[in-house]
């Protein structure tokens, strides 16, 4: 197991290096941020001084090397627009995104897995057909449309829930959280619900497909022949056997939601990382864009490593194979 972890860590370093090169080259090719935050009547002398001050006059390879040196010391640079270090800026927005992402993935998993197991166990029942119709709806309808419908229904017509901003927060070890206050919980309900639909649909279909496949195997036949109840068969065998793909999807969906909840955060004016990156792209804030994409790559690499380690915990055969 230790050898496997070391191998994956070395692979992660190589992947991060390649990703940082691609991200750096791509972001620095889309435009000049000097044109955004300098006034149109700025003289050429002022433009030249500003470009030199930020190091944009240096060759791209030299800018990248300086970025790597700073990155090795934990310095992602300073935001051109906000005028503060990039890493604290992103971390200050992360709790807001983390709240709705965790809520969406957890609710989607805790509801989707049992619903999918039931739909696979009783595929011809009316309830199973209703569950599958719900999953089709979750896959088919765009996120932005669901968000607008939620705002119009619960925020405008009924007036039950607020349709924007984050609401009241409570500091826990210096980190603000919304779900610990009633007002904050009301504010986060609609954006979290908007993100949940797709997660719920994916977990339903994944669990149903796994259940339908496993119910036909000899493992289930032997379990029934041993006199186990149907509840024990579903809980001890079916759920355990479909847990590996569920863990995979859970990890990847959590990472993708944390990284790309851009549409939801924009629609609901949720002050998270997604809204920050949209504002940074609009203003060509290069350091924020580069740091965000590098951190996203690091997030997915870390999640994949944790998922692989969870595999070995769930399936002893994989653990023996890696230690052999």
Image (cartoon, helix red, strand yellow):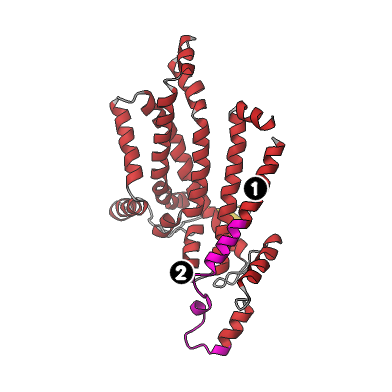
Q: Does the magenta stretch include residue 33?
A: yes
Identified at 30% across, 56% down, the residue is 156
Find residue 86 and report its image quarter: bottom right
Which label sits in the foreground, 2 or 1?
A: 1
Seen in the picture, residue 239 relative to 205 is either above or below; the reply is above
Q: Find the magenta span and give its range.
A: 18-45
Q: Name the residue under label 2.
A: 282
Would residue 148 be visible to someone looking at this image? yes
Callout 1 secondary element: helix
Residue plotted at (32% across, 42% down): 137
- Residue 180 in picture, x, y percent from top left: 52, 48
Q: Name the quadrant of the N terminus.
A: top right
Q: Are marks 2 and 1 in contact (CB under 8 Å)?
A: no
- Asked if residue 158 lies left or right of residue 295, the reply is left
Q: Where is residue 136 in the image (x, y as percent from the top left)?
A: 32, 40
239 and 186: which one is in front? 239
Q: Nearer the viewer, residue 29 or 143?
A: 29
Please rate how many residues cluster around mark 1, counting C-alpha atoms within 10 Å: few if below 14, some from 14 to 19, many from 20: few
Residue 299 place in picture, x, y as percent: 58, 50
Q: Quadrant of the C terminus?
A: top right
Q: What residue is shown with label 1?
A: 11
């Amino acid at each position: 197991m230790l050898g496997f972890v070391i191998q994956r860590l070395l692979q992660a370093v190589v992947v991060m290096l390649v990703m940082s090169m691609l991200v750096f080259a791509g972001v620095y090719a889309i435009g000049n941020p000097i044109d955004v935050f300098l006034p149109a009547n700025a003289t050429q002398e002022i433009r030249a001084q500003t470009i030199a001050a930020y190091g944009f006059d240096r060759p791209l390879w030299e800018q990248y090397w300086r970025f790597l040196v700073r990155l090795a010391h934990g310095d992602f640079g300073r935001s051109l627009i906000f005028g503060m270090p990039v890493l604290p800026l992103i971390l200050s927005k992360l709790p807001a995104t983390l709240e709705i992402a965790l809520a969406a993935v957890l609710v989607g998993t805790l509801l989707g897995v049992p619903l999918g197991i039931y739909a696979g166990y009783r595929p011809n029942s009316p309830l199973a057909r209703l569950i599958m119709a719900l999953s089709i709806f979750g896959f088919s309808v765009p996120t932005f449309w669901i968000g607008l419908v939620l705002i119009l229904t619960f925020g405008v017509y009924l007036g039950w829930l607020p349709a924007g901003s984050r609401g009241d927060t409570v500091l826990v070890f210096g980190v603000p959280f919304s779900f610990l206050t009633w007002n904050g919980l009301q504010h986060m309900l609609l954006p979290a619900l908007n993100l949940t639909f797709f997660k719920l649909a994916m977990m339903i279909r994944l669990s149903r497909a796994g259940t339908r496949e496993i119910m036909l195997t000899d493992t289930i036949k032997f379990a029934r022949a041993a006199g186990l109840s149907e509840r024990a068969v579903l809980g001890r065998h079916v759920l355990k056997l479909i847990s590996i793909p569920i863990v995979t999807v859970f990890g990847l969906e959590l990472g993708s939601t944390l990284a790309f909840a851009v549409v939801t955060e924009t629609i609901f004016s949720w002050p998270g990382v997604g809204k920050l990156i949209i504002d940074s792209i609009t203003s060509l804030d290069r350091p924020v864009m580069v740091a965000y994409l590098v951190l996203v790559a690091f997030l997915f690499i870390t999640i994949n490593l944790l998922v692989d380690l969870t595999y070995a915990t769930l399936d002893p055969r994989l653990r023996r194979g890696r230690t052999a």
